[in-house]
Image (cartoon, rainbow, N blue to C red):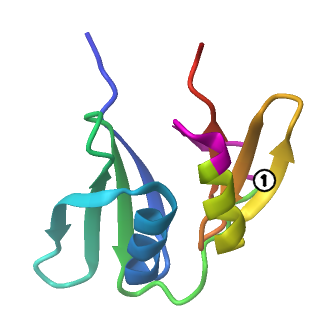
Amino acid sequence: MFSFNHFNFNVFDLEKSLKFYSEAFGLKPVREKIAEDGSFKIVFLGDGVTDFRLELTWLRDRTEPYDLGEQEYHLAFVAEDMEKAHALHEKMGCICYENPKMGIYFVEDLDGYWLEVIPPRK
C-alpha cells in the first residue's frame, strides 16, 4: 500500500523561495537536510493541516535558473477563502493565469513553477 509523502521543486534562491511560499501559501519549514559538504540543502515545507510536504532543494553549484520545459504539471492548493487568496496573490503580482469559468487560477513562483489555487469541494 502507498500514500503520498512529498513533491519536490528545485529552487535557485532558497531564502527567496522560503519567503514566497510562506507569504503566498502559509507554508513553514518542518524539516531540513544539509549535505555534509554544503553542496545542497533540502527544506521540507508543511501546511500545518496535512502530512503532505513540499520539498525545496537548493544546489550550491547551480549557476542558472532551471529550464522547466513546457511546464505540463502543477501543484494545487485549496483556498478556504478564494477572494482573500486572490487578493493576496494579486498584491504579490504572482497570478499568471485565471479561469473564472472554472473558479480557479494559477500563480507562478520565483523559479517558474505553476501553483493552482482551487476552492473547497462542495
**Left or right of 50 on screen, residue 95:** right
Q: Quadrant of the C terminus?
A: top right
Residue at 40% in and 87% down: 61
Residue at 29% in and 36% down: 49
Magenta residues?
71-83
Q: Decide if residue 108 is in sight here.
A: no
Q: Position of residue 71 (x, y in %)?
A: 72, 52
Q: Looking at the image, which residue sits at the far left?
A: 36
Q: Position of residue 85 (x, y in %)?
A: 60, 51
91 or 5, which is in the foreground?
Answer: 91
Residue at 68% in and 71% down: 91
Question: Exactly how many numbered labels are in the figure?
Answer: 1
Specify whether residue 103 is painted magenta. Answer: no
113 or 26, which is in the foreground?
Answer: 26
Q: Looking at the image, which residue sits at the far right?
A: 101
Specify whether residue 81 is painted magenta. Answer: yes
Answer with the quarter of the image where residue 96 lies: bottom right
Q: Looking at the image, which residue sits at the far top?
A: 1
Residue holding disc 1:
70
Q: Position of residue 34 (x, y in %)?
A: 17, 73
Q: Position of residue 99 (x, y in %)?
A: 85, 39
14 or 94, which is in the foreground?
Answer: 94
**Left or right of 51 on screen, residue 34:** left
Q: Amino acid at mark 1?
A: Glu
The crowding category of the residue bearing disc 1, from other C-alpha atoms within 10 Å (few below 14, some 14 to 19, many at least 20), is: few
Query: Circle 1 sits in a helix, a strand or a loop, which is it?
Result: loop
Residue at 62% in and 31% down: 119
Q: Decide if residue 42 is in sight here.
A: yes
Q: Quadrant of the N terminus?
A: top left
**Left or right of 55 on screen, residue 63:** right
10 or 75, which is in the foreground?
Answer: 75
